[in-house]
Image (cartoon, rainbow, N blue to C red):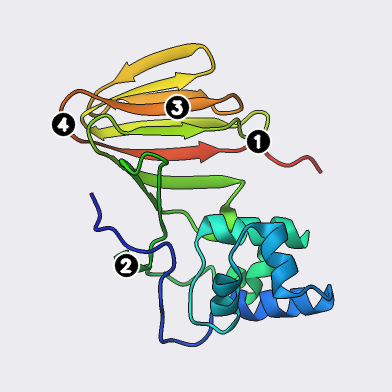
Amino acid sequence: MPKKRSLVTKTSKEPPPVGLSLAALRSARSLSMDALSRQSGVSKSMLSQIERGRANPTVAVVWRLANALGVPLPELLGSAAAADQGAIQTVKAFDVPVMRSRDRRVTLRVLSPVELAGRYECYQIDFESGGILESAAHASGAREHLTIIEGRIEATSGTHKAVGSQLDTLRYRADVPHQLRSIGRGKAAALLIVEFPAAKP
């Protein structure tokens, strides 16, 4: 399992565009940090760090901020979403956002770029023995594709259940409450792709 680290990655580089965009959007809406913190559920101290370029927010944080501000993700991301498509972008392992399940026995590394959140998402998931990852229903038509790398995992989608082992792939509806659970005595690992329905024109 990846080493435990904060959901915020400190950086000494130039302020990420999301910080500049956040400050501009907040100012344009005459929102104080306190007000945005209440609306988004993101702490005031984290908002301050992001705006000053002292922290890189995770996918979950950016998603909450974009919803609170009422803007699409690319607008909040600013120039970060307009990277040169002909270039090769290298994301170092320590820069990959990390999230954890409620029981702290499941670790998710967010492999897909933040600007694709809500459209196409990819995760590396590591389970301690008995770890459970519970998810509320996603948008109508959403599906998940789970490829098991190690161990055995039980997937529950609505009233349906299935168990997969190493190199099996489980595909199931994600627009209903769903759950992944490591079964057996050892650890388990998998790659998860979340597929969202295409937006209607």
Task: Identify the residue shown where x is 50% and y is 61%.
Answer: 58
Q: Residues within 10 Å of mark 4 (few under 14, many from 20)?
A: few
Q: Which residue is mark 1?
A: 197
Q: Which mark is residue 177?
A: none
- Of the pair 127 and 113, the residue shown nearer to us: 127
User: Marks 1 and 4, Cα distance to the nearest angstrom?
Assistant: 35 Å
Q: Give the x, y percent position of residue 75.
A: 71, 67
* Circle 4 SS class: loop
Kind of residue sitting beneath label 3: Gln
Q: Give the x, y percent position of residue 179.
A: 45, 27
Q: Are marks 4 and 2 in contact (CB under 8 Å)?
A: no
Q: Earlier in the sequence, mark 1 or mark 4?
A: 4
Q: Earlier in the sequence, mark 1 or mark 3?
A: 3
For residue 193, above or below residue 69:
above
Task: Identify the residue shown where x is 30% and y is 21%.
Answer: 164
Task: Identify the residue shown where x is 83% and y is 76%.
Answer: 30
Q: Earlier in the sequence, mark 4 or mark 3?
A: 3
Kind of residue sitting beneath label 4: Gly
* Circle 2 SS class: helix
Q: Viewer-nearest of labels 4 and 2?
A: 4
